[in-house]
């Protein structure tokens, strides 16, 4: 495997949608006339840097802890597969976070020092997800963190840095984005139930069991798609925002796969749900900008 390709795979491209979507939706949610392109780009660097950083950090911590083994069913991890040394993977995670932190610091200078607190909390959440003495990702709290940081904080934060205000629509959009991001983690955890349980990693999927985890995944996605429909019907979002629910066209097949498939077959569900989330974001962002 080529040097560049292994690092690209280690960054887990299908999950990077979770960094792009909240910035896209958050910026658009304030309205066309209020969007600041430079600040949006800085927010995108923060979100993508944190997403790449958390992926490399999880690779490192799960590799050195022995959570990832040859029995793992997902895409190969750099440390566990021997494609890269733990030291280099840890360094990659640090570099990604440093880039994100630099962009976040710049944004805080342009807007508010309160962003520094959000940034510090995000970095702490990144490290403690699979690192530290008691990783909360192994205690079934991973989805909570994804909802809060890749949903609420990233979306609302991007909306805030535009014009220093947060419309109600931004909060609702953030909730939808957070739920869709949770799906990506949930499908991974469903795939890894057996290996995680064997390693003592008590993810939400391990705690709920296979059947209930699959039901929750689909319910989570369906709830997310309903949010803009209800918001549009009540006048909180533009009427066109309801069209974002058409992302079900892209989500239906991945949900079917997630409901029945096992092992590596669930990777297709992850890719499909990433595309559905992106489609949702594009339609919702266009609806906000066109209103």
Image (tube, rainbow, N blue to C red):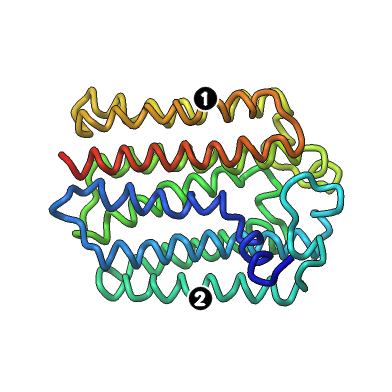
Under tag 1, what secondary structure? helix
User: Looking at the figure, which quarter contains the C terminus?
Assistant: top left
**Number of callouts:** 2
Location of residue 108 by image quarter? bottom left
Of 199 and 240, which appears nearest the observer? 240
Q: Which residue carries the number 1 mark?
A: 252
Identify whether 210 is placed above or below 76.
above
Query: Mark 2 packing: few (<14 Cα in 10 Å), some, or many (20+)?
Result: some
Where residue 168 sits: x, y (%)? Answer: 24, 41
Identify whether 48 is placed above or below 281.
below
Residue drawn at x 20%, y 28% as measured from the top left: 239
Nearest-to-viewer mark from 1 and 2: 1
* Mark 1 in CB contact with mark 2 (< 8 angstroms): no
Q: Which residue carries the number 2 mark?
A: 98
Under tag 2, what secondary structure? helix
Where residue 248 sits: x, y (%)? Answer: 44, 26
Mark nearer the N terminus (1 vs 2)? 2
Location of residue 2 by image quarter? bottom right
| Image side of residue 201 versus residue 10, left or right | right
Residue drawn at x 74%, y 58% as measured from the top left: 77
> Furthest-left residue in view?
33
User: Looking at the figure, which quarter contains the N terminus?
Assistant: bottom right
Where residue 234 sits: x, y (%)? Answer: 22, 24
Residue drawn at x 61%, y 61% as measured from the top left: 11
Query: Mark 1 packing: few (<14 Cα in 10 Å), some, or many (20+)?
Result: some
| Image side of residue 176 versus residue 66, left or right | left
Residue drawn at x 73%, y 46% as measured from the top left: 74
In space, the residues marked 1 and 2 are separated at their CA atoms by: 38 Å
Where residue 90 sits: x, y (%)? Answer: 68, 72
| Image side of residue 210 versus residue 91, left or right | right
């Amino acid at each position: 495997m080529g040097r560049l390709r292994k690092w690209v795979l280690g960054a887990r491209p299908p999950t990077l949608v979770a960094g792009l979507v909240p910035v896209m939706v958050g910026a658009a949610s304030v309205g066309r006339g209020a969007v600041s392109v430079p600040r949006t780009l800085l927010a995108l660097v923060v979100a993508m840097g944190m997403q790449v950083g958390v992926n490399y950090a999880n690779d490192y911590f799960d590799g050195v802890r022995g959570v990832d083994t040859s029995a793992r069913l997902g895409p190969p991890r750099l440390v566990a597969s021997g494609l890269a040394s733990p030291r280099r993977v840890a360094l990659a995670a640090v570099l990604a976070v440093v880039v994100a932190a630099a962009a976040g610091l710049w944004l805080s200078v342009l807007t508010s020092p309160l962003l520094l607190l959000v940034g510090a909390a995000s970095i702490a959440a990144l490290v403690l997800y699979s690192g530290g003495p008691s990783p909360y990702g192994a205690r079934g709290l991973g989805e909570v963190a994804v909802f809060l940081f890749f949903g609420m904080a990233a979306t609302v934060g991007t909306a805030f840095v535009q014009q220093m205000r947060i419309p109600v629509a931004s909060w609702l959009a953030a909730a939808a984005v957070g739920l869709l991001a949770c799906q990506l983690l949930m499908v991974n955890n469903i795939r890894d139930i057996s290996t995680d349980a064997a390693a003592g990693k008590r993810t939400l999927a391990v705690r709920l069991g296979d059947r209930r985890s699959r039901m929750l995944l689909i319910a989570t996605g369906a709830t997310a798609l309903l949010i803009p429909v209800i918001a549009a019907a009540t006048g909180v979002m533009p009427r066109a925002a309801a069209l974002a629910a058409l992302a079900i066209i892209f989500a239906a097949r991945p949900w079917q796969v997630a409901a029945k498939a096992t092992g590596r077959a669930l990777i297709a569900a992850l890719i499909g749900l990433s595309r559905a989330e992106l489609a949702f974001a594009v339609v919702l962002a266009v609806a906000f900008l066109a209103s």
